[in-house]
Image (tube, grey):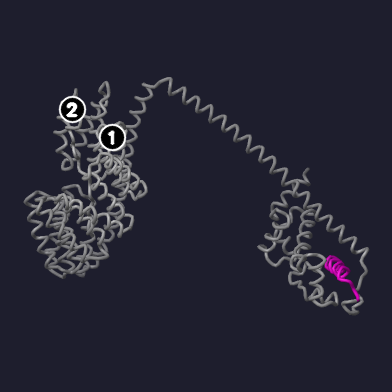
Amino acid sequence: MIRYLFLIVIVLLFGGVPASGQSDYLARIKEAAVLVPDQAVKADSVFTVILEEVSALQPPNDSLLVLTCFILGTNNLYQGKLNLALDYFDKSLFHNKRNILPKENMSSLANKAIIYEEQHRFNEALQACRQALEFAEQSRDSSAIADVWLNLGVLSHRMKDIDRAVEILGNTYNFYRSRRDTLRMANVLNNIATCYYPANLSLAESNLKKSLELYRQAHDDYYIAVTTNNLAELETRQKNYSDARQLLQDNISLCEQKGFMEALSVAHRLSGQCEIESGGNLGAASASLEKSRELAQKTGRSDYLRDIREAEILLQARAGNFEGVKKMLEEYKTMNDELAQENARIVNSEFQTIHEVKKITQQKDLLEEGISIRNRQLILSLLALLAAALAIGIIASQYIRLRRTTRTMYRMNVELANNAAISLGSLNSDTVTRDDGENNGEDNISISNLYLDVLKRIERDKLYLNPTFSLLELSEKMNRSSRYVSQALGEVGKISFPNLVNNFRINEARRLIADNPNITVIELMEKTGFGSRQSFNRNFKTATGFTPSEYQERAKDTQQQ
């Protein structure tokens, strides 16, 4: 897989830094800057000392603080310490609020975008890029604008918007070509190749080859080595093994000559992988992978070890050593666990460092601000207490109102159930019974009387307690047609048969709960004729405003009172 990240390199614009009283520090910064990134650890220690000294200057010198924090951020970015780098870039931007070093402002924002991108915080990366673009446009620096557009193209690729990424990078390439900026043209083509990989290998290969040729014209040996490795990996993927071997052989010679140990480790690993996948000399492949491992360990690139181990597993499989494959897979799992722990340790170490630095800064700020800060904290605490008291009062008031409302709802339900029982009792006494079993014709009884007879019959015989009770069964008991009974319910009672039966059942449930609040929901459902608990809960809630359990709690409270 092609691995390529465009980093904004350090540009020390010493000519743009006010010179009064700081020439010694500028000389030290310029001398130490050559340590980045090849001697990153040493650069960290040197610039940390410089930052401590510059921070203690009175009056404070913002330009030196901006420059030192920016370089520390860039150095940590090269080391993959993303959180520390982000913290230093934030400090550089803080001290550069008056835009005393415009290019450092733009570069800090662009590098923050790179960090956010690596952390998959794409929205924040996009925002940082846009801020960097604003600084670049304000300075009317067309090269700086193009640099930011290059980062926007890379960001679009990471966000899976390939068409937009290729469009942005293509326009950026045309700009650099108009300026005959060979190195940046090569950088753009490298990123375009990444956009096409692996969906379109031929276009990825074409752009990598153009990029490699431009790096050769610019005599940039480091990027020649990196890009040659990428091209060789792509040729291997396309099974062009002879081309891949030749590229890697030439690149190994270049890396050994120039001392590019990291690129040399990758080249040996790719050489071994090419031999394995092509069915070539497995002994030579084993030797290449061993050299790659030695170089990765020597240069501290533990992230390379996982790729090397994957190639070694493939080597053992091709050699038919399945016991070796099994053993290596176990080691591979252990390695992944250790890498995860190491990454966690690094991140934890970063945050501890950030925490310690911030702690010291906060202590200094507390000493400087003193009583002013404590007064502000006291005011904020009082406001918070007042807000909390107000919130508690509102919550208590709402709770009391809710309690009153639920009690009122419960009393209304009890009254409704009692009124229903009274009404049905009056029906029993006032309505003429027609149970003689003879059908004297539907016209002999008014539709109003039929409706009342239906109510009386359902209540008297508790017909609703039967879960299978139907309109047909009711019609047969009334010696009337289903159509006529349904008409009576609809025209007089303004209700459908299912809703009428459910109302009887709900009233029955309310009476049962009033008599025994501890009755279970299952018993309620079975004793009121509902066929399922879901139907019972739904209809009870609709009719009463309470679930059966809530209604039982209200009934218990009423009994206790």
Decide: is 413 above or below 284: above
Q: Nearer the viewer, residue 177 or 37?
A: 177
**Above or below 309: residue 489:** below
Give the residue at mark 2.
25
Q: In which quarter of the image is residue 174?
A: bottom left
The residue where tag 1 is placed is 92
Measuring from the top left, give residue 46's x and y in whole percent. Answer: 19, 33
Q: Quadrant of the C terminus?
A: top right
How many C-alpha atoms fall within 10 Å of the one at disc 2: few (<14), some, or many (≥20)?
A: some
Towards the viewer: 247 or 15: 15
Q: Which amino acid does label 1 sit on?
A: Ser
Is 234 on the left or on the right of 91, as rendered?
A: left
Q: Does the magenta stretch include residue 456?
A: yes
Region rendered in magenta: 444-461
Magenta span contains residue 229: no
Give the residue type at disc 2: Tyr
Please, is residue 443 above or below residue 96 in the view?
Answer: below
Instruction: Return the disc, 2 or 1, that comes first in the chain's sequence.
Output: 2
- Would residue 235 appear left or right of 58 to someone viewing this image? left
Work out how far the residue at label 2 is from the one at label 1, CA to CA, in angstroms.
17 Å
Q: Where is residue 417 in the image (x, y as percent from the top left)?
A: 81, 56
